[in-house]
Image (cartoon, rainbow, N blue to C red):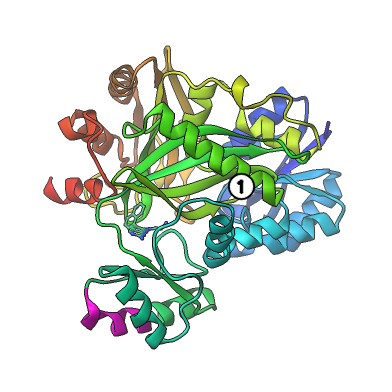
Amino acid sequence: MFKKILIANRGEIALRVQRACRELGIATVAVHSTADTDAMHVRLADESVCIGPPSARDSYLNMPAILSAALITGAEAIHPGYGFLSENATFAEMVEAHNLTFIGPSPTHIRMMGDKITAKTTMAELGVPLVPGSPGEVETLEEAFAIADKIKYPVLIKAAAGGGGRGMKVAGQKSELEAAFREARAEAGAAFGNNAVYMEKYLDKPRHIELQVLADSHGSVVHFGERDCSLQRRHQKVLEEAGSPAITPAQRDALGKIVTEALQKIGYRNAGTLEFLYQDEQFSFIEMNTRLQVEHPVSEMISGMDLVHEQIRIAFGETLGYTQSDIHLTGHAIECRITAEDPETFAPSPGLVSVFHPPGGLGVRVDSALYTGYRVPPHYDSLIAKLITYGKSRDEAIARMKRALREFVISGIKTTIPLHQRILENPEFCAGDYTIHWLERFVASE
Ligand code: MV4
């Protein structure tokens, strides 16, 4: 096994990876910006290296500084966490070029899935269902009109380099297509330096359902069921659950079989998540994420597996050592993402945490890098804690979440705990009756 791993991240996910390393007997190297000198991930690591000033560009995205930190500390592998460099194929290549191991997929697969058009054409060839749309890039307005006539309005123009909703334009009818096409292209070019766009039929009330997979470097691929991530605000996930209240075990098994066979055919390795839209009993693949995701704990809770532990073993070249029939998904898990934001206006609320008292008890997990006296810096993502509850049933997980949210004390800064409390009191949420539009309407109606 690796003796030492560098964790190229901060906050709760840096702690999450450190915990897995500690349990595997692997020493950890933290990297940090000058704004994170007092951060928990620095305090708990075996060693730490300052890699630059507060701006993420100059620190957590600074590839030469991170590689140097790995080389001077004698780390053998780098875990990128999520965000930052986690889906940067060039970084993965640089890691390998320095004879270090990137704990994640191959640069080729990161690049393949980073281009949404290549991701979709690859999956389509492998028999994964897609939304009706353009077979690839839409290069001209004439082409756009022809495809829209075929798939019928409303249609959506998406950026090939996009994802997470950036650079998307809806055309409800023919008269709106020209503007949507031009705007999507211009925005994609400006935001990503790549103006390639594609087109899909616009689904008006889907759920966002994603499938968690793991693959070893010897051709074994398994899945851990789905997560329902429909509760989002401005393309930011707010609450996730495993499994989806809308999916039956038979649907899960059928989708899991298609996806694991597809990934085996392309030789995918390490953790991955396939995103689907689910509407009218149909799954449509939209994107694949080639990293560990924020919401991975809900899959861990229902499977009893440590996904980070598995990522590290896989990166070292070990075999999974189990098959799909060894994975038993039981019960239900919910994650509330708690951010340092005003729960009504969503204005950022960094600053001094005067009291941090996390909840506990049966079926409660808190992934957070906060502590009493910590100052939440203004430079990074506002996620400060993930509260995860597990129950034998969805109702039990909900009851535990309400109880845990009442116990949770974070003073000195504003947090979204009150928003989560209101969601959990809502009859539609409790009935599992929601789509990707539910949360925006809920927030607006309050
Ligand atoms: C869609 C869609 C409707 N129809 N594609 C937004 C982010 C990106 N991952 C995909 N997105 C969407 N793609 C088709 N063909 C609606 C969305 C969408 C969305 C998806 C998941 C979760 C929240 C969302 C909020 C608005 C739009």
Q: Position of residue 390 (x, y in %)?
A: 41, 20
Respond yes or no on whether mark 1 lies under 8 Å from ligand 1: no
Q: Which residue is mark 1?
A: 262
The relative height of residue 261 versus residue 143 in the rendered view (above or below) is above
Q: Quadrant of the N terminus?
A: top right
Verify whether residue 177 appears in magenta: yes
Q: Quadrant of ligand 1?
A: bottom left
Q: Position of residue 263 (x, y in %)?
A: 63, 46
Residue 117 appears at what percent x and percent y? 53, 67
Which of 432 and 188 lies nearest the eye of the viewer?
Answer: 432
Residue drawn at (23%, 34%) of the image: 429
Q: What residue is drawn where x is 81% and y is 55%? A: 96
**Type of residue at label 1?**
Ala
Q: Secondary structure at mark 1?
A: helix
Badge 1 density bin: few <14, some 14–19, many ≥20, Cα 10 Å? many
Name the residue nearer the viewer: 305 or 388: 305
- What secondary structure is the stretch in magenta mostly built from? helix
Magenta range: 173-182
Spot occupied by residue 436 in the image (x, y as percentages of width and height):
29, 49
Residue 4 or 272: which is nearer the viewer? 272
Q: Is residue 443 left or right of residue 5?
A: left
Q: Is residue 24 visible?
A: yes
> Relative to 88, does residue 291 appear above or below in the rendering?
above
